[in-house]
């Protein structure tokens, strides 16, 4: 029959997925109650809204349940006190979720949105971050698409983890120094489905903003998921958005949906910096002739409809698809997007 000390020792093998330290070391194991073959473990999480609390509880159950003589394991969850958070380097932040926010200096937050899926918001977010970094700015990307994240795949071919710091967990950096945060960086496997309702998704986004130590950034690019509901609303209402970049594609349907996103930005009084059309055309490498694969462009008319600057068009480029699939987007040479950035720079807030 396992003892309380043996259970506590076993829990030293259970890691917090974000902080990469074991639960005992972090002081999360508040109590272990042993009643015959039944065990109740009380855990104090850094926040009760932790998006990975179910994974942590499952790891505890599996670890303790594997000990001799243990038939059942119950996990009860509570939240650390401000003093406990300070002791493990997360600081104290009463009355809000963020614990590292006070130590961050993020000058401007740019949201990239469309309202429609599949138009290339993540690609535009990545290219925007890359172009700003090439100009010498300190840049980060927050992947707010919790259920369909793709930013790490584009930038981090070998994977990455959050790094601990006195001010809180720090997002990893890409080869050129762009800080990246995405739910995929704290999942055991990148293809694990995140099956969450709206409140959990919103809580995760708030944690990515407030509980992580981003440090000094000139620009934080936020890659929003499709739609105008929970995730987008959380970003627009909870984060200090400096401006919104809208992304569309040539189809009329995409234009209709992006107008909804523009309407949302206006209702929430967020400035629209401009509209970019992705997948506008394909240029044949043999002849140089342009083909409108998805039909003629409606982007300029859409920009007029929403009263926003039209920033330019991005072509369909097989090379950029290859670089994204292999985590080498930063090797993409300056091209059409640099001229778009030049146009966007007129409307960007200055760092």
Image (tube, rainbow, N blue to C red):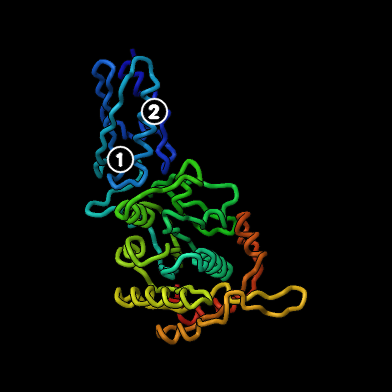
Local packing at callout 1 (Cα closer than 10 Å; few below 14, some 14-19, many 20+) is many
Q: Position of residue 201 (x, y in %)?
A: 35, 54
Work out which residue is located at the far top of the displayed protein and give it.
Answer: 1
Query: Vertical placement of 21 versus 287: above or below?
Result: above
What secondary structure is marked by label 2? helix
Q: Is 310 situated left or right of 62 in this image?
A: right
Q: Position of residue 247 (x, y in %)?
A: 48, 73
Give the spatial CA distance, label 1 vs label 2. Answer: 18 Å
User: For the N terminus, which image quadrant?
Assistant: top left
Q: Are marks 1 and 2 in contact (CB under 8 Å)?
A: no
Q: 308 or 14, which is in the foreground?
A: 308
Residue position for label 2: 62
Q: 334 or 319, which is in the foreground?
A: 319
What secondary structure is marked by label 1? strand
The mark closer to the camera, 1 or 2, is: 2
Identify the residue at horizontal 35%, vertical 50% (top origin). 196
Residue position for label 1: 45
Identify the residue at horizontal 41%, vertical 85% (top origin). 305
Residue 59 position by quadrant: top left
Identify the residue at horizontal 45%, vertical 80% (top origin). 347
User: For the C terminus, which image quadrant?
Assistant: bottom left
Q: Is 23 situated left or right of 325 in this image?
A: left
Query: Vertical placement of 202 versus 116: above or below?
Result: above
């Amino acid at each position: 029959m396992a003892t309380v000390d043996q259970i506590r020792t076993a829990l030293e093998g259970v890691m917090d997925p974000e902080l990469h330290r074991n639960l005992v070391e972090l002081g999360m194991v508040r109590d272990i109650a042993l009643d015959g073959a039944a065990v109740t473990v009380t855990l104090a999480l850094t926040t009760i809204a932790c998006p990975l609390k179910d994974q942590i509880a499952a790891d505890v159950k599996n670890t303790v349940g594997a000990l001799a003589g243990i038939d059942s394991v119950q996990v009860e969850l509570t939240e650390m006190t401000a003093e406990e958070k300070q002791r493990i380097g997360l600081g104290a932040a009463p009355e809000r979720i963020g614990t590292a926010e006070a130590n961050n200096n993020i000058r401007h937050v740019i949201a990239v949105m469309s309202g429609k899926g599949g138009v290339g918001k993540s690609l535009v977010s990545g290219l925007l971050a890359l172009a700003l970094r090439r100009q010498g700015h300190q840049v980060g990307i927050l992947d707010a698409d919790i259920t369909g994240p793709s930013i790490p795949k584009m930038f981090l071919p070998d994977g990455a983890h959050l790094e601990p710091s006195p001010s809180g967990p720090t997002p990893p950096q890409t080869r050129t120094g762009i800080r990246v945060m995405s739910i995929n960086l704290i999942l055991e496997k990148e293809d694990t489905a995140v099956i969450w309702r709206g409140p959990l998704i919103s809580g995760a986004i708030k944690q990515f903003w407030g509980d992580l130590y981003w440090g000094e950034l000139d620009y934080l690019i936020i890659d929003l998921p499709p739609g105008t509901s929970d995730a987008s609303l959380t970003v627009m209402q909870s984060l200090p958005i400096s401006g919104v970049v809208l992304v569309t594609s040539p189809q009329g349907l995409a234009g209709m949906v992006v107008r909804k996103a523009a309407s949302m930005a206006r209702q929430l009084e967020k400035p629209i910096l401009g509209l970019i059309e992705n997948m506008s055309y394909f240029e044949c490498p043999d002849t140089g002739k342009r083909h409108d694969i998805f039909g003629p462009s409606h982007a300029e008319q859409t920009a007029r409809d929403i009263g926003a600057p039209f920033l330019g068009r991005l072509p369909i480029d097989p090379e950029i698809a290859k670089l994204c699939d292999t985590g080498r987007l930063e090797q993409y040479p300056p091209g059409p997007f640099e001229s778009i950035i030049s146009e966007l720079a007129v409307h960007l807030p200055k760092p």
